Amino acid sequence: MTQCTIAKKRVSVYPSAAPNKPVLYLHTYADEGDAAYRAMQQAGCPDFTLIAISGLDWNRDMAPWDIPPVTGQGMPCTGGADAYLRCLLQEILPEAERAVRGRVPWRGIAGYSLGGLFALYALCRSDCFARAASMSGSLWFPNFSAYIQAHGMQNHPSHVYFSLGSKESKARNRYLRTVRQNTEAIEAFYRSQGVDTALAIHPGGHNQDVPARIAAGLAWLLQR
């Protein structure tokens, strides 16, 4: 594994053992990439390169548009996803892939929580990624389900994975409790477009077993 700073983001590259393997881009809130990568290695996943990105301005870089705080203790989201996506494609990706062996047969994009929201948004705004995984994605985000269904995808992905904790939709908050309904609607939309999809429901709430849930989603992408 090598680490570097690109565009003020921390980028960790876990290279494949052999050349010409897929590359997965994972956006993390608390550097979960290392734990997720170890779990995938222990599970015997197919060979791949993981590029984990942290040090993000989470509520800006991962948010497609501005929204006020949705909880009493929450922070507003200031939509900077388009600016960050340009940074990812124009600065981070070319530099990080210097460590990739051979050609890249396909790229995937993934994330947890708002990172999962961003992964799907990136499919709408870029043709770079062929597969995506949204683990406990913040798909309660106001108007996001409608946006996905109205704007479709720049690049028709082959596989998209979703997951949620079983308790996530039981929140009292009027925004957060829509997460399962919206996730199911978006998953059904992709499926209707001929995309291979999966929706996994894990026991517990939003913050439970995060590295394991990330690993499960990334493994699914690699095993298709």
Image: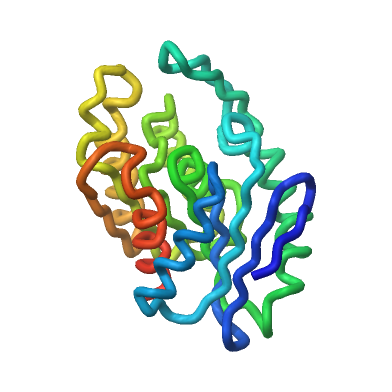
Residue 105 picture location, percent across and down: 57, 78
Residue beneath the point at 71% across and 39% down:
83
Residue 176 picture location, percent across and down: 33, 26
Residue lying at the far top of the rendered structure: 72
Residue 21 picture location, percent across and down: 56, 81
Q: Is 27 on the left or on the right of 143, as rendered?
A: right
Residue lying at the far bottom of the rendered structure: 18
Residue beneath the point at 31% across and 59% down:
197
In the displayed structure, 35 sits above or below 46; it is: above
Q: Which colouring convention does the figure follow? A: rainbow
Q: Is 52 on the left or on the right of 147, as rendered?
A: right
Of 138 and 124, the residue lying toward us: 138
Residue 204 picture location, percent across and down: 23, 41
In the displayed structure, 33 sits above or below 70; it is: below
Of 78 and 2, the residue lying toward us: 2
Quarter of the C terminus within the rendering: bottom left
Residue beneath the point at 30% across and 54% down:
192
Q: Is 6 on the left or on the right of 112, as rendered?
A: right
Q: How many labels does the image show?
A: 0
In the displayed structure, 15 sits above or below 216; it is: below
Quarter of the N terminus within the rendering: bottom right
Q: Is 86 on the left or on the right of 174, as rendered?
A: right
Residue beneath the point at 46% across and 35% down:
147
